[in-house]
Amino acid sequence: MSDNSHKNRLDRRQFMKRLGLAAAVATTTLAGCKKAVEGYGQSESSDVPADKMTYRINHNTGDKVSILGYGCMRWPTIEATDGDGKIIDQDAVNRLVDYAIAHGVNYFDTAPPYCQGQSEKATGIALKRHPRSSFFLATKLSNHRMAGQGWTAQKMFDESVKMYRNSFKDLQTDYIDYYLLHIVGIGEGLPSTLERFIDCKIIDFLLEERKAGRIRNLGFSYHGDIKSFDYLLSRHDEFHWDFVQIQLNYVDYRHASGINYNADYLYEELAKRDIPVVVMEPLLGGRLAGLTQHLNGRLKQRRPGDSIAAWAFRFAATFPKVLTVLSGMTYLEHLQDNIRTYSPLDPCTQEELALLEDTAQVMLQYPSVPCTACQYCMPCPYGIDIPAIFRHYNTCINEGFVTASDQDENYRKARRAFLIGYDRSVPRLRQADHCIGCNRCVHHCPQSINIPSQMQRINAYVEHLKQNA
């Protein structure tokens, strides 16, 4: 099945029944603006357990995987010594990796394009300092920018193999524990998926690499076109997917936006095939780490000692087929908070799941941009900082600084906060007014955001604020 009828197949009773069972069974991520993730690090306890991490067993290999996985997309950065942009702060990465491993985290997920192409090298340097058997390493075949270029199948194959082998070099390893076909479903959907992985025969090469032991587990990460997801699962008996990575959080579970598909369908299809699930975007790009004051208050009233982010992480891990939940932890306080949440995991109760579903429905009433700060749209050829603009706009919505009318009671306060914060978080030359609508970014967005349209909308709002003092 691959039509939109999947999106709302479960009624509330089915939703609660399935997750209630998961709660009984399950006993066993941001760079840039810290303001956007202020729901982190608010646990009452300052202690960070070193020996209570929750683990899940991969039944395919027997791997004992930490339920908290380290997403290496958002490593901390510093200014380059030559003044030409930013580079990864390797010392900071080393400290974060050391701390994570010391506290039970053993799954690290990276990819060739992460951190403007620097993540694999930085991750490899940090992990090389630890015994190879002490962690599981995941990376991806990120050949999405090769699609649609008119290449021959042979060139697609050759360039893909080159990328694959370069990952081993940058990661300083002779095997990869979890290897993924990356962002399946974006671009032209199924035709792009076929061009990237099937028609060029790279899938056959990867299957042979798995047989040789250089790949221990083979899977794919899914965004967008449901036909691609259904197609690859339809060939499970042939490919034997060891795991699949999906976007799962309490908003996307039943209310996915754009061309993304509801995670209830994705999870159900994987669970019935007994395929382990890796979760990405548990915080929906940080938006679930800090909600509106009202929604934050409701969650804090229920569990005063937990951060707002902890709710999203507990939700994702409540599903028993979830092997690990990825978080891109730039700051130590985020890593510590997530370790507390999962040391050990306290699965969501049915009442808490109902509260989160209600929270998701309330959030749908706010006009935020569904950006997850994945950086796939970057770099912009005109220098625009697309994720930072969306991050500031969404943060201001949560904090009540986006008003419907200049007649609102708090308009002047909101106007000042939005404009001052905009200039502080996004340099003038990188703001939305410099977008020319070239559309180069649109095809790379896993959330299917019409980025030029959103830039135009946000710039119009900024101009309105400037003209209505």
Image (tube, rainbow, N blue to C red):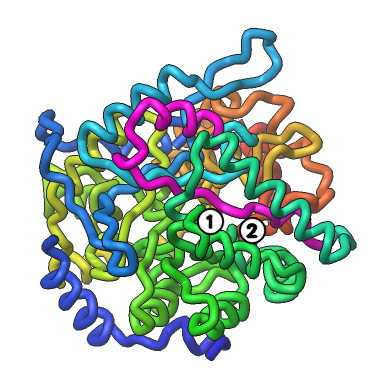
Q: Earlier in the sequence, mark 1 or mark 2?
A: 1
48 shown above or below 356: above
Q: Residue at x 79, y 50 (%)?
A: 440
The amino acid pointed to by label 2 is Ile
Q: Is residue 220 among what the camera can see? A: yes
Residue 384, picture quadrant? top right
154 shown above or below 378: below
Q: Residue at x 35, y 68 (%)?
A: 276
Name the residue tied to disc 2.
Answer: 449
As for residue 137 lying within the magenta part, the answer is yes
Q: Which mark is residue 370?
A: 1
Marks 1 & 2, CB-CB < 8 Å contact:
yes
Quick one: 322 or 318, which is closer to the camera?
322
Helix, strand or loop at disc 1?
loop
19 shown above or below 432: below
Helix, strand or loop at disc 2?
loop
The local crowd at label 2, few if under 14, some if 14 to 19, many if 20 or more residues have their Cα within 10 Å, is some
Q: Residue at x 37, y 61 (%)?
A: 249
The local crowd at label 1, few if under 14, some if 14 to 19, many if 20 or more residues have their Cα within 10 Å, is some
305 shown above or below 92: below
Quick one: 178 or 109, which is closer to the camera?
178
Rendering coords of residue 261 (x, y %): 51, 73
Rendering coords of residue 30 (x, y %): 44, 37
Quick one: 440 or 272, which is closer to the camera?
272
As for residue 285 lying within the magenta part, the answer is no
- The answer for how far apart the CA atoms under marks 1 and 2 are is 7 Å
The magenta region covers 120-148
Residue 203, picture quadrant? bottom right
